[in-house]
Image (spheres, grey):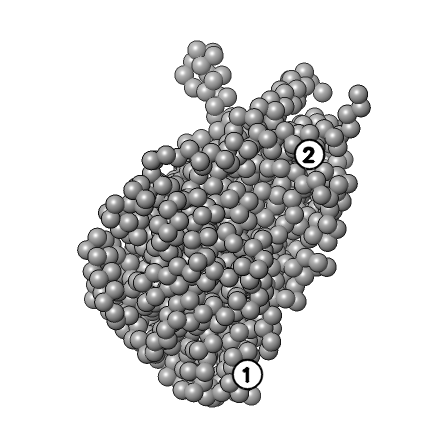
C-alpha cells in the first residue's frame, strides 16, 4: 500500500474532524441546567476604561433577569473573561466559550480588532455573538448582532448640526485604525454634503501622547472647528494639551468618541466643557426608564457604580436584554431559533429609548442624543428618535443573502 | 517667520520632555550601571502622588515639585533595599527584576485606584508666540528641564557627596578601599534617581494625564535616549535628547506622528551603530 | 555527539510523538487550540533561548522576527491563495532580516546592552509601522495590512499543493508539535556541532575565542540568524491559530518571551519551553479571576524568580533534585 504524505495528512485531518464532532453537538443535552452566557471584555490593560463599565452593566442585566425568575424558567450563569487588552486572549476565550462552556451567547469585544478576532471563531463553532459597541459599521454576519450605533446614526446628523453652529472649515483628527479611518471618511462626506470643507485629516496611532506639533498645525490651518475621532487613554492627552495651549476658547470641538469611556471624568471641567458629542445614550438622559434604571443600578453597586458616560456600557445592557427578548420569543436557546426570533424585528424599551433590531442587517435602530460636556458630565442638547442603521443597510442584506460573512467597507462617496 | 518660531518652540519642548523623562533613568544607569525598567512606573507613581496631593488640597506646585519626588524617592529607597541591592553587578538580572516590579506596579495601581483618576489641568494658561498659541506650561517645562540638569550637575560637582559619588562611579573597588561606603552611595543614588523620575511624573501629569499603563509609553523612549547618550549621564542624555527630540519633532511636524516616531527611532539606531558606546563614548568624554 | 545528547533527542522525539498522537484524541477542541498557541509561543521562547542562553546575545526585540514571520506568511498566503510556498517565504523573510540586522550590529562591534537597545528599537519601528497601515493605500498585492486590526483573514495552512484542503485545528496542533520537536532537535544538533561549541565559547569569553582565531562576528551572526528563522516559524504557527496583528511586534510580547526564558532557565533549551507553557497557562488563568490584575501576578512571579531562583526553573529544579539524590540539603 502506498501511503503518500498528502494522503496521510488528509486522513489525519479527517480523523480529527470526526473526533471533534461530539464536542460541537453537545449543546442539546442541557436540560434544566442554568443557561451559560459568556462576557469577554477588557477589565485590565489599556482598554479597561471601556471594559469595566461594560462588565458592570452586563452583570447588572443578568442579575435583573435572574431576579425576575430567569429565562424560560432557567437561571442564567454568567462567565466573565478578561482578555487583558490582548487579541490573542480574545481568540482563546472565544474558543473556550464556544467549545468548552457551550455558551448560549457571547457578549463582548470592544475594538473592531477584537470583534474580528472572535466573530469568525464564534461563527465557526456555531455560537451566537453580540457586539455591543459603537463602531464603523458594515459587519454582515447572521451569527453576529451589532447593537451599537454606526456613523450613519450619529455622524450624519451631528455634522450638519455643528456646521450650522460653528462654520464650514473642518479639521479632523482621528485614531489610526479602521474605526478612525472609516469614520473620518464619513465625516468628510457629510461635511462636503453640507457645503463645507475639510482642511486636513490627521491620524494618530493609539499610543501617541504628544500632540504639540499637531496643535500648531491646526492653528496654521485656522479651521472653524475640530472634529475628533480619537480613541483610548493615550489620546485623552490631546484634549488636555489643546486646552493648555489656550485653544479651547478659540476653536470649538466636536467628537464622535469623547465620553465613550471615562474621558469626561479624566479631564477637568476647564479642559472638557463645551465639547459636543453624539451617542445613543448618556447617563443624563431624562426619561422615566433611565431614572428607574439608575436608581436600581446605584442601589446595587453603591459607590462602586461606574459613570455611564457614552453608550458602550448601556448598549451592553440593552444588547443582553435584546438577546433575552429573542430567547423568550423563540421559547428556546437554540441558536437558529433565537436568530430567527430576533430577526422578526424584536424591540426593547429601556433607558436609552426604544431599540429595534433590523433583521436585514442584524444591526439596530436607536435613539441618538447630542450633548455637550459639562462639569464631568453631559448636558443633553438634542434628541433624535429611531435612527436606522442606513450605512450597513446600504451594503448588507441578510434576508436575501443569509450566508454572508464579512465586514463590508462601506464605499463612502466623498 | 512666526511659524518657524512656533516650530522651534515645539522642538525645544520636545527636547525638554525627552530630557525630563530620561534623567532619572540616566542617573541610575550612569552611576550604577543599573537599567531600571520600572522607570516608567516611577513616572506614573509621581503623577498619581501629585494628583492625590492636589485632591487633598495641597497646592498644585507643591504637589508636582515636592510631593511627587518625595514619595517616589522613598519608594526608590525601599526598592533599592529589597531588590536592587541583592543584584548589584548583575545587569540583566536587575533589568528583569525591575521589569517584574514594573508589571506588578501597573497591576497593583490598577487594582487600588482603578482606571479613572481625574487629573488636574496645566497651570499658567497660554501664551501667544507670533500668532501661535502655545501653553505657557510647556515653556515652563523647558525651564524645569534646565533646572533639573543644573541641579544634578551642581550636586555632583560641588558637594562632598558628589565627589564620593563620582569616585564610586569611576572605580568602586578603589573607592571602597579608600573607605567610601559604596553601598550607601548606591542607595542614595538610586533613591535620588527615583525622585527625579517622580518629579518627571509630576511635571508631565498635567499634559499627558495619568493612567496605570502610562509608563509603557515612556520607558522605551527614555531607555533609547539614555543608551544613545552613552556613559556620561548628563552630557549623554542632554545631547541624545537634543538630537532625537529635535529630529522627532521636526519630522512629526513635516510628516505624520508615526513617521516622526519612526525617524526618531531610526536616528537612534544609526547613532548607536556609528558610536557603539553612545554619543559620549566619542564626544564630551570627560563630561559628566 | 555525546550519549546524553542522543538520549535527549530521542526523548524529545518520543514525547512529541505521544503528545501529537494522544492529545487530539482526548482533549476538548478549545484545549487543543490553546495548546497550539502555547506551542507556538514555546517555539518563540526556544528561539530566544538559542540567541540569549547560548549565543549570549540579549535580544529585546525577538518579536520582530515573530511578527515578520507572521506577516510574511499572511501576505504571501493571501496573494498566492495557497500556503505551500507561503511557509518558506515566511521563514526566509525573518531569517534575512535577522541576517541583515545581525550584520549591522555584530560587524559594527556593538555589544551587550547596546544590542538590547537596537533590537528593541527595531521591534518598536516595526510595531509603529504595522500600526499605521490602516489606510486603504496600505496593501501588498491582494493583502491589506490592516493597521491596528491586523489581518483577520489570515488563511489557515493547507496540505502542500492542495489549496482547498485546509488543515483542521487538530491537524494544525500536530503540525505545531512536530515543529517544536524539530526545532528542539535541530537546536540540540547545532549546539553539539563544532559551530555550536564555538558559539558557546564566544559567550563565555569573546576575547579568548577571538585570540584562538575564531571570528566571533560570524558565529554570532550565524546563531542570531538561526534564532530569527525559528522565531519566524513561531510567527507562522501563531498566525494560524490567532491571526497576525501589530501586537505580534509589541513590547508586551518581547517582554513575555524574556520572562519565559528567564523563568525557565537561561542556558537551557527545555527550560524556556516549559517556562513559556507554564506562564502562558498562568496568564490565561489569571484572566478568569475576578478582581485580580494579571499584571500584578506576573510581575511578582518575575521578581521572585530573579531574586530566589536566578538560574531559572529547570536548572533550579535539577539542582534541588541532585541535592536530594546525594542526600544533602539543596
Q: Residue furthest right?
A: A2
Few, some or many residues within 10 Å of mark 1 (<14, 14–19, 20+): some
Few, some or many residues within 10 Å of mark 2 (<14, 14–19, 20+): many
Instruction: Tell which of A92 and A172 is nearer to you.
Output: A92
Residue drawn where x is 49% and y is 16% of the image: C322
Residue drawn where x is 79% and y is 21% of the image: A1
Residue drawn where x is 49% and y is 54% of the image: A144
- State whether residue C201 appears in this view: no
> In the picture provided, is C284 more to the left or to the right than C40?
left
Quadrant location, the N terminus of chain C: top right
Q: Is residue A396 above or below residue C14?
A: below
Instruction: Tell which of A15 and A343 is nearer to you.
Output: A343
Quadrant location, the C terminus of chain C: top left
Question: Does dot 2 land on a helix, a strand or a loop?
Answer: helix
**Residue indicated by mark 2:** C199
> Where is residue C208 shown, x and y percent of the image?
68, 34
Subunit under mark 2: C
**Residue indicated by mark 1:** A192
Instruction: Tell which of A331 and C127 is nearer to you.
Output: A331
Amino acid at each position: 500500500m502506498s501511503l503518500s504524505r498528502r494522503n496521510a495528512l488528509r486522513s489525519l485531518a479527517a480523523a480529527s474532524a470526526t473526533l471533534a464532532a461530539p464536542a460541537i453537538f453537545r449543546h442539546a443535552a442541557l436540560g434544566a441546567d442554568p443557561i451559560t452566557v459568556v462576557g469577554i471584555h477588557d477589565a485590565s490593560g489599556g482598554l479597561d476604561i471601556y471594559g469595566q463599565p461594560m462588565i458592570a452593566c452586563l452583570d447588572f442585566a443578568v442579575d435583573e433577569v435572574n431576579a425576575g425568575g430567569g429565562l424560560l424558567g432557567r437561571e442564567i450563569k454568567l462567565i466573565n473573561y478578561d482578555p487583558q487588552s490582548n487579541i490573542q486572549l480574545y481568540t482563546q476565550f472565544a474558543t473556550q466559550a464556544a467549545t468548552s462552556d457551550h455558551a448560549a451567547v457571547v457578549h463582548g469585544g470592544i475594538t473592531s480588532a477584537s470583534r474580528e478576532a472572535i466573530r469568525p471563531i464564534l461563527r465557526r463553532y456555531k455560537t451566537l455573538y453580540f457586539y455591543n459597541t459603537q463602531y464603523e459599521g458594515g459587519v454582515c454576519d447572521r451569527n453576529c448582532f451589532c447593537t451599537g450605533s454606526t456613523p450613519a446614526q450619529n455622524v450624519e446628523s451631528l455634522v450638519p448640526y455643528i456646521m450650522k453652529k460653528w462654520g464650514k472649515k473642518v479639521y479632523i483628527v482621528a485614531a489610526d485604525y479602521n474605526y478612525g479611518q472609516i469614520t473620518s471618511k464619513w465625516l468628510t462626506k457629510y461635511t462636503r454634503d453640507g457645503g463645507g470643507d475639510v482642511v486636513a485629516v490627521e491620524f494618530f496611532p493609539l499610543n501617541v501622547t504628544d500632540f504639540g506639533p499637531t496643535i500648531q498645525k491646526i492653528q496654521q490651518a485656522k479651521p472653524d472647528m475640530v472634529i475628533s475621532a480619537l480613541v483610548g487613554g493615550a489620546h485623552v492627552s490631546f484634549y488636555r494639551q489643546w486646552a493648555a495651549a489656550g485653544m479651547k476658547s478659540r476653536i470649538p470641538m466636536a467628537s464622535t468618541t469623547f465620553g465613550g469611556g471615562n474621558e469626561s471624568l479624566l479631564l477637568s471641567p476647564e479642559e472638557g466643557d463645551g465639547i459636543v458629542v453624539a451617542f445613543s445614550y448618556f447617563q443624563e438622559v431624562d426619561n422615566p426608564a433611565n431614572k428607574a434604571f439608575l436608581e436600581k443600578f446605584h442601589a446595587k453597586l453603591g459607590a462602586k457604580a461606574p459613570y455611564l458616560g457614552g453608550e458602550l456600557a448601556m448598549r451592553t445592557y440593552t444588547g443582553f436584554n435584546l438577546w433575552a427578548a429573542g430567547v423568550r420569543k423563540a421559547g428556546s436557546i437554540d441558536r437558529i431559533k433565537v436568530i430567527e426570533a430576533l430577526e422578526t424585528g424584536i424591540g426593547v424599551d429601556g433607558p436609552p429609548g426604544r431599540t429595534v433590531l433590523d433583521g436585514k442587517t442584524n444591526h439596530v435602530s436607536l435613539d441618538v442624543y447630542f450633548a455637550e460636556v459639562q462639569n464631568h458630565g453631559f448636558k443633553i442638547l438634542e434628541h433624535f428618535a429611531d435612527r436606522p442603521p442606513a450605512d450597513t443597510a446600504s451594503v448588507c442584506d441578510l434576508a436575501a443573502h443569509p450566508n454572508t460573512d464579512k465586514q463590508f467597507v462601506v464605499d463612502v462617496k466623498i | 517667520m512666526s511659524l518657524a518660531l512656533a516650530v522651534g518652540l515645539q522642538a525645544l519642548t520636545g527636547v525638554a520632555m525627552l530630557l525630563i523623562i530620561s534623567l532619572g533613568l540616566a542617573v541610575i544607569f550612569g552611576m550604577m550601571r543599573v537599567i531600571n525598567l520600572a522607570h516608567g512606573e516611577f513616572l506614573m507613581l509621581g503623577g498619581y502622588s501629585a494628583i492625590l496631593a492636589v485632591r487633598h488640597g495641597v497646592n498644585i506646585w507643591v504637589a508636582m515639585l515636592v510631593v511627587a519626588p518625595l514619595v517616589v524617592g522613598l519608594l526608590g529607597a525601599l526598592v533599592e533595599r529589597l531588590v536592587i541591592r541583592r543584584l548589584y553587578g548583575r545587569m540583566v538580572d536587575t533589568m528583569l527584576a525591575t521589569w517584574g516590579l514594573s508589571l506588578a506596579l501597573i497591576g497593583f495601581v490598577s487594582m487600588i485606584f482603578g482606571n479613572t483618576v481625574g487629573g488636574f489641568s496645566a497651570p499658567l494658561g497660554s501664551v501667544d508666540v507670533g500668532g501661535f498659541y502655545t501653553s505657557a506650561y510647556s515653556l515652563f517645562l523647558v525651564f524645569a528641564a534646565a533646572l533639573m540638569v543644573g541641579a544634578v550637575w551642581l550636586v555632583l560637582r560641588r558637594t562632598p557627596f558628589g565627589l564620593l559619588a563620582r569616585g564610586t562611579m569611576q572605580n568602586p573597588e578603589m573607592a571602597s578601599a579608600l573607605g567610601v561606603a559604596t553601598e550607601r552611595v548606591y542607595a542614595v543614588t538610586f533613591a535620588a534617581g527615583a525622585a527625579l523620575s517622580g518629579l518627571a511624573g509630576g511635571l508631565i501629569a498635567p499634559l499627558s494625564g495619568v493612567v496605570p499603563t502610562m509608563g509603557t509609553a515612556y520607558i522605551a523612549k527614555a531607555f533609547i535616549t539614555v543608551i544613545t547618550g552613552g556613559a556620561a549621564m548628563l552630557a549623554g542624555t542632554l545631547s541624545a535628547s537634543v538630537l532625537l527630540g529635535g529630529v522627532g519633532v521636526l519630522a512629526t511636524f513635516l510628516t505624520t506622528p508615526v513617521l516622526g516616531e519612526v525617524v526618531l527611532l531610526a536616528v537612534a539606531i544609526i547613532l548607536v551603530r556609528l558610536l557603539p558606546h553612545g554619543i559620549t563614548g566619542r564626544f564630551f568624554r570627560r563630561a559628566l | 555527539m555525546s550519549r546524553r545528547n542522543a538520549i535527549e533527542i530521542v526523548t524529545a522525539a518520543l514525547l512529541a510523538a505521544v503528545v501529537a498522537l494522544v492529545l487530539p484524541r482526548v482533549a476538548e477542541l478549545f484545549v487543543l487550540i490553546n495548546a497550539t498557541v502555547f506551542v507556538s509561543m514555546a517555539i518563540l521562547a526556544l528561539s530566544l533561548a538559542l540567541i540569549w542562553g547560548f549565543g549570549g546575545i540579549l535580544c529585546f526585540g525577538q518579536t520582530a522576527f515573530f511578527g515578520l514571520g507572521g506577516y510574511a506568511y499572511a501576505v504571501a498566503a493571501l496573494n498566492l491563495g495557497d500556503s505551500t510556498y507561503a511557509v518558506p517565504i515566511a521563514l526566509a523573510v525573518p531569517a534575512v532580516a535577522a541576517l541583515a540586522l545581525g550584520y549591522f550590529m555584530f560587524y559594527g562591534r556593538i555589544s551587550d546592552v547596546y544590542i538590547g537597545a537596537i533590537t528593541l528599537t527595531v521591534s518598536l519601528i516595526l510595531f509603529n509601522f504595522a500600526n499605521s497601515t490602516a489606510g486603504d493605500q496600505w496593501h501588498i498585492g491582494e493583502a491589506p495590512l490592516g493597521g491596528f486590526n491586523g489581518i483577520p483573514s489570515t488563511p489557515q495552512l493547507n496540505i502542500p499543493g492542495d489549496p482547498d484542503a485546509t488543515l483542521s485545528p487538530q491537524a494544525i496542533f500536530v503540525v505545531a508539535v512536530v515543529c517544536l520537536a524539530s526545532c528542539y532537535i535541530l537546536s540540540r544538533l547545532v549546539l553539539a556541532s563544532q559551530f555550536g561549541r564555538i558559539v558557546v565559547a564566544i559567550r563565555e569569553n569573546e576575547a579568548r575565542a577571538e585570540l584562538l582565531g575564531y571570528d566571533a562576528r560570524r558565529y554570532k551572526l550565524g546563531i542570531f540568524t538561526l534564532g530569527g528563522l525559528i522565531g519566524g516559524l513561531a510567527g507562522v504557527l501563531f498566525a494560524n491559530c490567532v491571526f497576525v496583528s501589530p501586537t505580534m511586534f509589541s513590547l508586551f510580547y518581547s517582554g513575555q518571551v524574556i520572562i519565559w526564558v528567564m523563568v525557565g532557565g537561561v542556558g537551557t533549551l527545555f527550560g524556556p519551553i516549559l517556562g513559556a507553557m507554564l506562564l502562558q497557562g498562568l496568564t490565561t488563568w489569571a484572566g478568569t479571576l475576578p478582581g485580580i490584575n494579571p499584571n500584578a501576578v506576573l510581575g511578582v512571579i518575575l521578581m521572585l524568580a530573579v531574586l530566589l531562583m536566578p538560574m531559572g526553573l529547570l536548572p533550579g529544579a535539577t539542582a534541588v533534585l541532585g541535592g536530594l539524590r546525594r542526600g544533602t540539603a539543596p
